[in-house]
Image (cartoon, rainbow, N blue to C red):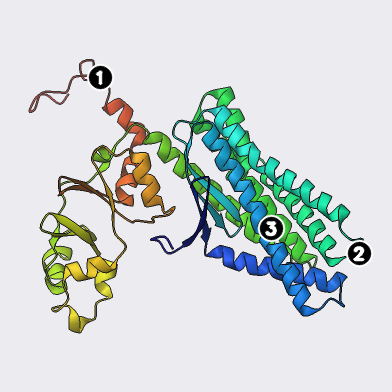
Amino acid sequence: MDNSRRSLLVGRILGIDVLVHYSWVFIAGLIMLGFWGRLDQLHPSLGATTALALSALGAGLFFASILLHESAHAIAARGRGLQVKAITLYLFGGATEADASGRRPIDEFVVALVGPIASLVASAAFAALASIAEGDSALRDVLAYLAAANLVVAVFNLLPGLPLDGGRVFRSALWGLTGDFTKATRWATAAGVIVGYLLVGLGFLSLWAGALGGLWLVAIGWVISQSARQTEYHETLQSEFAELVAADIMTSPVITIPAQTSIADSVRDYFSRRVQTTFPVVKGSRVVGLLSVQAVRKVPATEIWKTTAGQVASREAPPLIVARATPMREVIAGLAGGRDGKPRALVVEDGLVLGIISPSDIIRRHSIADLMGPALADRVEHPRPAPGGPTS
């Protein structure tokens, strides 16, 4: 299990970690129930053990086909020189985590398109297997169902809105035509929101008509519309911070708490007197962890004098440690969750804590991104006024 306790490492493909998000357990159960219900309807005389085995087989093969879809993305990304970190399977599909900082429009186009193509290949393969299976067998129906499911996955992913593959294809085309990645992302995001709301509307119409399956459309549409906005925000950050390093963003100097400090003294001498809500805890020159308000609240009032900051900090997930020159795109990836889910990043060099980066630091810099260009313009061309000089 990764540090965020949200994804389980289940294996590696071509050196790429394959993770399963905890929500996949839920969807896997529903997929098995779907196969079971279909088999019960088409083959009522089928024994329970056989039906369970075929349902598990169907769910496993569907899992494998989604993994094939994401592996296609990963292999294509690697083939175009992009670093692939992991593949994670989620509630409504999967995601390939890659460093896309150096990608070009053609790279995004190819990497996005190969996923749906892989699903179409899987659909054709299952259809071929179903055609040679025994005429009216339950196995044939399972294979036919998998063929249809993969076809739906392929077509669905080609819808032209982020974060779907079709949205990335759409964005790559706009990006190539306009040369403006930010504008292309904004348009593809708007398309993703529209697609999501259309699915929500279609889901409610289905529910009104008495089809409970409409709940799935509502849920999927809502996830797409929200994910589209999150994707735009993340991509915009990556673009704005592309040339920045940790030292450009960190808050410094940083107040640290000695590991032997009691929780009571930590509250009285640090949390009550500083605006920080999280403090690095150090033992000598070594960082032992982070102490947050949330962690302090877990300590019983009767134990605050006996418990030290080091004891509490060491129980929490270890902080993300970066150097001054660490690219901000790597820091953002660590803070964003992905596989680490760290709420803070510590900038540490030669055993000294130089700074701390929190989501609020990133949000603050993002909020003034449009002002930074003029502010950092050539100072020879735009000299500063002399201290104490005239203001008008």
Q: State the SS at label 2.
A: loop
Q: Is residue 379 above or below residue 130?
A: above
Q: Which residue appears at 15% of the width and 26% of the height?
A: 391
| Few, some or many residues within 10 Å of mark 2 (<14, 14–19, 20+) | few
Relative side of 31 to 268, left or right:
right
Q: Is residue 9 above or below residue 178?
A: below
Q: How far separated are the C-alphas under marks 3 and 2?
A: 21 Å
Q: Give how far across and how far down residue 148 sits, in percent.
A: 79, 53
Query: Is residue 171 visible to us here?
Result: no
Q: Tag 3 or tag 1, which sits nearer the N-term? A: 3
Mark 3 in CB contact with mark 2 (< 8 angstroms):
no
Q: Give how far across and how far down residue 75 sits, in percent.
A: 57, 39
Q: Which mark is residue 378?
A: 1
Q: Which residue appears at 63% of the width and 65% of the height?
A: 28
Q: Which residue is mark 2?
A: 136
| Few, some or many residues within 10 Å of mark 3 (<14, 14–19, 20+) | many
Q: State the SS at label 3.
A: helix
Image quadrant assignment for residue 223? bottom right
Q: Which residue appears at 60% of the width and 68% of the height?
A: 26
Between tags 3 and 2, which lies in front? 2
Q: Which residue is mark 3?
A: 62
Decide which of 241, 24 is in the foreground and name it.
Answer: 24
Q: Which residue appears at 91% of the width and 64% of the height?
A: 136
Mark 1 in CB contact with mark 3 (< 8 angstroms):
no
User: Which three-letter amino acid code belongs to the residue tagged 3?
Assistant: Phe
Q: Residue furthest right?
A: 135
Between tags 1 and 3, which lies in front? 3
Decide which of 136, 199 is in the foreground and name it.
Answer: 136
Q: Give how far across and how far down residue 127 sits, in percent.
A: 82, 51
Q: Give how far across and how far down residue 295 sits, in percent.
A: 27, 69
